[in-house]
Image: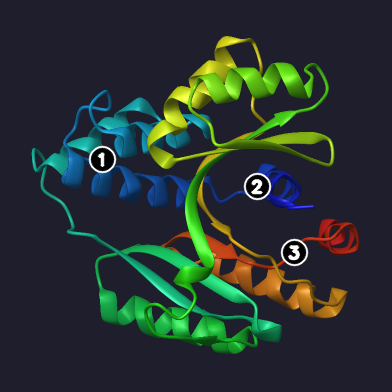
Amino acid sequence: MSGHSHWATIKHKKGAVDAKRGKLWSKLSRAIIIAARHGGGDPVMNIKLRYAIDKARAVSMPKDNIERAIKRGTGDQEGITYEEITYEGFGPGGVAVMVDVVTDNRNRTAGEVRKLFEKGGGHMGSAGNVGYLFERKGLIGVPAEGTDEDTLMGIALDAGADDLKKSGDTFEITCDPSAFSQVKAAVEGKGLAPSHAEITQLPKVQVEKDVETAKKVLRLVETLDDHDDVQNVYTNLSLTEEVLAEASKE
């Protein structure tokens, strides 16, 4: 069991009762700024920008905020200069962890992320330490109720997806990041509402840990994710049913 959809569900449930919308909007603004700076301000031509805008709209970020972020990215409006960095390290039990950040101060962020790793029972490594254990993929989760595997497989593959697997009560579609938008559109075009859709780093091989170690890893992930500069956190921890049940309680 991959557990991606289950962990996404836990995060979404926590987010629903979390009054941190302002922080989330700030993170998404940075993602839009970076995307617009590197690929231009037209979401039709800039897939990365379109993805960032879709994520912002999904959490009701105001249109003015989105447009302002695009202008800052294209240089039409002055603002702070951000850069993208990925930190790699190990969590409790030697679990691999990757952290995507967008920061205006590389040295400050590196020091803070390093401390979070150490406080969480892990340590930050150098570039390349764990990156080879992951591959960048589009991931779309579709509730199994309301569709069948063969039908969804046909829709997904025709749109350019790589694979489809069932995980619990969810079908998980994986695809190349360049095909993400068209696969998502094809699914939605058939009246199916994804439970989650993201471009992520999927572990090539997952590692299982005992419940206590797994809980420590998840606490580290959550602490890292809460940092203002952090955009995404990835791990190769296998989320077993037992681990997920315990994580849902916290």
Residue type beneath disc 1: Ala
For residue 226, say whether it is visible: no
> The residue under label 2 is which amino acid type?
Gly
Residue 149 place in picture, x, y as percent: 76, 24
* Residue at 72% across, 71% down: 207
Residue 209 in view, yes or no: yes
Could you give the CA–CA distance between mark 3 and mark 1, rounded to whole angstroms?
36 Å
Q: CA distance from mark 2 to mark 1?
A: 23 Å
What percent of the width, then of the height, locates residue 75? 9, 43
Numbered disc 3: secondary structure = loop
Q: Quadrant of the C terminus?
A: bottom right
- The residue drawn where x is 56% and y is 51% is 20
Residue beneath disc 1: 69
Q: Is residue 188 above or below residue 31?
A: above
Q: Residue 205 appears in which quarter of the rendering?
A: bottom right
Tell me: residue 197, above or below residue 44.
Answer: below
Residue identifier under label 3: 238
In the depicted view, which residue is nearer to us: 209 or 52?
A: 209
Give the labeled residue for mark 2.
15
> On the rendered structure, is 49 left or right of 183?
left
Quick one: label 2 or label 1, which is nearer the N terminus? 2
